[in-house]
Amino acid sequence: MEESSVFEKFELHLNESSKEFLKEINKWAYFLSIIGFVGIAFLVLIAVFAGALFSTMASTMPGMGMYGGSFGAIISFVYLLLAALYFFPVYYLFKFSSNGKRAFRENDSEALTESFGYLKSHYKFIGILMIVMLVLYGLVILFSLLGVLFGR
């Protein structure tokens, strides 16, 4: 005799309050994603202008020498890397909100399911990024402590 899970028999229905909450969440998610895309554009602009600025400074200031241009390239690379990392959660948030809006506008369950898939991807990306950052912070603290201990 095969037992089935309680969740296999469970069908979720959204009441009107839940639908209104989701509609409002979609509006805020859309707003935050647009602000995120604007932020990404600023990061890319900073990356472009930082490289040009430091290259110009290297050629005009005698103290900068050849290091100014390479420093500008490093700054540009870091800002482009940050923009690339920031793009994915913002994109997932945008897709969550746009599919959620479509789901309620067209009464489309598939669009709502797809919307929640993007929300899952958004939080999964943020969670993995948080784990990576915590590990990096831990390594920095560990190596700092080791440097202090062995530096004496």
Image (tube, helix red, strand yellow):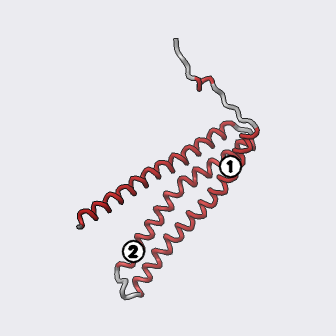
| Residue 34 pos. (x, y %) | 64, 59
CA distance for labels 1 and 2: 41 Å
The answer to whether mark 1 and mark 2 are in CB contact below 8 A is: no
Q: Residue at x 48, y 62 (%)?
A: 82
Q: Nearer the viewer, mark 1 or mark 2?
A: 1
Please name the residue shown 55% across and 63% down the image: 40
> In the image shown, does 42 or 4 lie closer to the viewer?
4
On-image quarter of the C terminus: bottom left
Instruction: Estimate the x, y position of residue 59 in percent, counting from the top left.
Output: 40, 85
Residue 63 placement: quadrant: bottom left
Q: Is residue 73 above or below residue 140?
A: below
Residue tagged 1: 26
Most distant residue in the top direction:
1
Q: Which residue is mark 2?
A: 71
Quadrant of residue 107 within the rendered picture: top right
Q: Amino acid at mark 2?
A: Phe
Task: Judge from the rendering whether residue 116 lies leftward or rightward of residue 129; answer left or right.
Answer: right
Q: Secondary structure at mark 2?
A: helix
Residue 106 left/right relative to 144: right
Question: Within 10 angstroms of label 2, few (less than 14), some, or many (20 or more) residues?
Answer: some
Q: Is residue 142 above or below residue 24?
A: below
Q: Splitting the image into 4 quarters, where does residue 9 fall?
A: top right
Q: SS of the residue at dot 1?
A: helix
**Residue 64 in the image, given as x and y percentages of width and height:** 37, 83
Mark 1 or 2, nearer chain start: 1
> What's the residue at 56%, 68% (across, down)?
42
Q: Nearer the viewer, residue 23 or 151?
A: 151
Name the amino acid type tagged 1.
Asn
Rendering coords of residue 53 (x, y %): 47, 79
